[in-house]
Each structure stands twice: as structure tokens, then as C-alpha cells.
Amino acid sequence: HVLVIALVLSAYMATRKRWILLIAALNAQHLFMTQHRAGLLALAGASILGIAAWITRTRARSISPLFFASCFTAVGVMIGCVLCAILLSNKSSLMSDGSLILRANSYYDAAQMAVAHPILGHGTGTYEIASVPYWTPFEQENFVRASRYNAHAHSEYFNLAAESGMPAVFLYVVFLVSLILRGLNTYFRDDSDDRRRLGLTCAALYLAFAIDSGFGFNWRAPVSGAVASLLAGCFEGALRGNATPPPKTGVRLAHAGLFALIPISIAAAWIELGSFRSQVHLLRGLGAKEAQAYSASLTEFERSSRGAPWNWVPAYEAARISMASGDLTRAQSWIEKALALHPHHIPALIDQARIAFARIATS
């Protein structure tokens, strides 16, 4: 996902420094070799938008807001036609691609979840927990055969709809579309060549991001999401030009809001630090488990559970270690905690039954 952003920015930087194209070629090769199909489609959409905007600006003298909407719609239609052509030309291979079929089923699950809770969703980060009752027959069979399932919907729009509700999807779309239109407006109306190029880059980048969001989780991914957020602020400042400075009252209110966010930021950083430490202990525990150092493994899982009490994985792994060590009472306690956090975790339900049978056999 980050490579898509890097390639769009490389096209902008190459207007000044041609050697950037060498690095862009390496990034493009990596994107192609990893078969990131959504990224290639996103770059195609950005390219179509850039070419269409350039042709239009060189041919038309005055641009109306209606044209902006028409141009944006035309680009969307062209991207849709390209996607349909790809699907039709590779129909046989796509129908046998288990990964794509599994992703398509995740879209269906997320849509069903959004219909059930359209306003507030099921809760942020709960797709993996809440989606199990919505599994399709294909997903059920796929889990039985290969123990594979969707930990999240492979689309930001569907995932947001399922977890945070339709209002969150609306806000996300508004965020992307506003940046696209802001960039196009600057490209068509600004007098500065530098800002025009920057405006077109902004529009192309966030169109690519919007397309990539339809088939992946580029906003959820920490690196690409952080880069897109930082670039939004950079574009907003750079495209202002010689705008009238805000009144002093507005500046003071903005500063007061920033100071109010400081304790919230500190609290969020502290929580995330605990989550990171929990992940470190979890990985250490899994390593000790592979080495059959069960006592050390159990200690690490306990520390991981304390660091992130909302995560069911350490509790589930601690239950399995306790069961392997013959401590059925502790195993029962841990498995109950894991199921309290993830009631639909099928392996935990199976292990709960095994623990119950084992306790009956030893009583």
C-alpha cells in the first residue's frame, strides 16, 4: 500500500529530478512481483485521472464545478470498465483463486454485519470476533479444510461499515473526495505551476488511495495510514497559497484545542505501548512454546495477557500450555477468559470441550 503512495509522489518529484525514476522503477517492479493487484489498479486510476486532467486543462479555458463532477465520474466509469475487462479476461483463473473467493465472502459478511448494526457497527477491531456467525458455507468449509478465515474484510469501506457503521464510511469517503476535489481545483484554477503540479499529485494520490481502499486495508495499515494522514496536512498547507491568515481568535482556539489533545495523545501512546509490549511477550511465549519450554512460555503468555487484557490470543495460548502440562484447572480458567473475549473462537470452543472431557476422565 505504501508503494502506491511512493510511486505517485515519485511521478511528481520526477518533474524536477529525473533520477527519481530509477527508484520508482524498483518500487514498481516490487509492486508487480508481489502481485498486488489492487495497487496496480489504483495506479491505473491515478494515471487516467492525471492524463484526463492534463488534456482537459490544455483544451478548455474555463472549468465549471459541473465539469469537475463529470470528470470525476468519467474516471470512475473508466476504472470500472478496466476492472471488468480484467475480470472477464481472467475469469477461469479468478474463479479458482481461493484467496479472491475468500475475500469476496468477507465482503458479503461485512455487508450483512453492516445491515445488522448500520449506525454504530459492531465495534472497532471486532470484525474477527463478530463475523463468525455471518460466515458463508464456503467460509465454513474453508475453515474446516484449511483452518483459514478472514481476520478482517479486505476492503476499508466494508470493514468500516461492519465495525464502525455507515456514518464512519461516509466520513472516510468525504475525507478522500474532498482531497481529490481540492487537488483538482488547484490544478485547474491556480496561477502557480508548482502548486498546479502539486494539486494534480494530491488528486491522483488520494484517488489511488480510494481505489486501493476498495480492495485492501491501506488506511488500517499503520505505515500507509500514517503517511496518508501526514500528506493530507502537507497538501492542505502547500495548496493554500497566499490565503488570508485566520483571525487571532481562531488561532487561539486552535492552540487551545491542541493543548487539550496533549493528555489524550499521552494516554493513547501509553495504551499502545502496553499493546506493543504485550505483542513482544506473546511472540516470546510462542517461541518458548516451540522450544517446549512450557513454564517460560506460560509466564510470557501471562505477561502478554496483562499488557493487553482485551486480546484473547494470550489467554488461549496459556490454556493450551496449561492443558499440555496437565493443569486442567488452570486450563479451564484460561479458556473461559479467552471465550469471554472471543465467544465464537472455534478452536477455543473445541479445546474447552477437550478440557471438560479430560476433567471428567480424571475425576
Image (spheres, grey):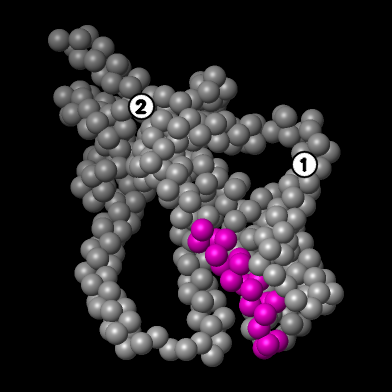
Question: What percent of the width, then of the height, locates residue 356?
Answer: 24, 15
Q: Secondary structure at mark 2?
A: loop
Question: Quick check: 48 left or right of 350?
Answer: right
The alpha-carbon separation of the residues under discs 1 and 2 comes to: 36 Å
Could one spot residue 27 in this view of the protein?
no
Question: What percent of the width, then of the height, locates residue 324?
Answer: 29, 27
214 up-or-down from 87: above or below: below
Q: Quadrant of the N terminus?
A: bottom right
Binning the other alpha carbons within 10 Å of mark 2 as few (below 14), some (14 to 19) or many (20 upward) gives some
Task: Give the amino acid at mark 1.
Answer: Cys
> Residue at horizontal 31%, vertical 32%?
342
Question: What percent of the width, then of the height, locates residue 72?
Answer: 69, 59
Residue 182 magenta: yes
Nearest the camera: 327 or 25?
25
Q: Earlier in the sequence, mark 1 or mark 2?
A: 1
Question: What percent of the width, then of the height, locates residue 86?
Answer: 79, 43
> Residue at horizontal 25%, vertical 78%?
256
361 up-or-down from 25: above or below: above
Question: Quick check: 255 left or right of 74?
Answer: left
In the image, which disc is placed on residue 84? 1
Could you tell me how many numbered marks the image carries?
Answer: 2
> Residue at horizontal 23%, vertical 44%?
309
Task: Give the amino acid at mark 2.
Answer: His
Question: Quick check: 62 left or right of 108?
Answer: right
In the image, which disc is placed on residue 259? none
Q: Which residue is mark 2?
A: 344
Q: Magenta stretch: give its range.
A: 174-193
Question: Quick check: 105 left or right of 290?
Answer: right
Nearest to viewer (mark 1 / mark 2) = 1
Binning the other alpha carbons within 10 Å of mark 1 as few (below 14), some (14 to 19) or many (20 upward) gives few
Q: Quadrant of the C terminus?
A: top left
> Residue at horizontal 51%, vertical 71%?
232
